[in-house]
Amino acid sequence: MAKILDRLLLFLYSLSIGILSVIAILLLSGVIPDKYEIQDGPAVYIAAISVAVILFLLSIRFFYISLRRDRASLPSVDQRTEYGDIQISMETIENLSLKAAGKVKGIRDLKSRIRVSQAGLEIMIRAVVDGEHSLPLLTTEVQRQVHDFVQETTGIPVADVSVYIANLTQSPSFKSRVE
C-alpha cells in the first residue's frame, strides 16, 4: 500500500512541477506576454530558463519512474545453464516444499518460507501434526521428503530444512452409546 501511495505522490509531484516549469519557460522566453519585466538583464533570463528546463527534465524522469512497472518485486532464484538463464520464483519453491511435506502421513496445515543463502536454499516448514505418529520420525521424514523433492525438481541445492511443529490436532473422540 505504501508503494502505491509513494507512486501516486511522485506522479502528482512530477506532473505539477512539469506544468509549472513549462509555464515558466513560456513566460521567460516571451511566447506568453507578461506585464512584468526584469531589470537585471539577459543573464537572469538565461539562468531562470535554465532552471526551468532542468526542472522540466527532472519532472519527466520522475513521471516515467512513477508510471513504470516494478520488475524487481518478484523474488526468484536465478540459475545459469549452458542453454541460458532460468528463473524460479520463490512462490514456486514454497509450493514445491508444501507439496513434498504434504505427502507425509500425519501432517496438516502446512506453511513454508524460503531463504536463499550461500550454501543453498533454507526451507522452513511450519506444520500441525495429528499426534498419532512419533514426532522425531515425522519431522525427519518431512525434512527428507522436502529436501529431496525440491533439490531434484529445481536443481538448486537445499542447505537446510527446518520443521516447526506448531500444534497438535485433536481428533474427535466418539463414545459408543448403549441403549
Image (cartoon, rainbow, N blue to C red):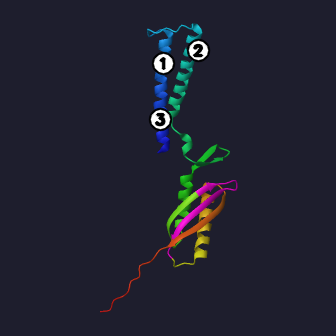
Task: State the quadrant of the C terminus.
Answer: bottom left
Which residue was labeled with disc 2?
Answer: 47
Which mark is first along the chain, 2 or 3? 3
177 and 61: which is toward the camera:
61
Q: Residues within 10 Å of mark 3 (few under 14, many from 20)?
A: few
Numbered range of the magenta stretch? 114-130
Whole-number angstrom distance, CA of label 2 to CA of label 1: 15 Å
Residue 122 found in image quarter = bottom right
Which residue was labeled with disc 1?
Answer: 22
Q: Is residue 35 above or below residue 144?
A: above
| Secondary structure type for disc 3 | helix
- Residue 55 x/y as whole percent: 54, 23
On residue 9, the disc is 3
Q: Residue at x 45, y 31 (%)?
A: 12
Whole-number angstrom distance, CA of label 3 to CA of label 2: 28 Å
Which mark is first along the chain, 1 or 2? 1
| Secondary structure type for disc 2 | helix
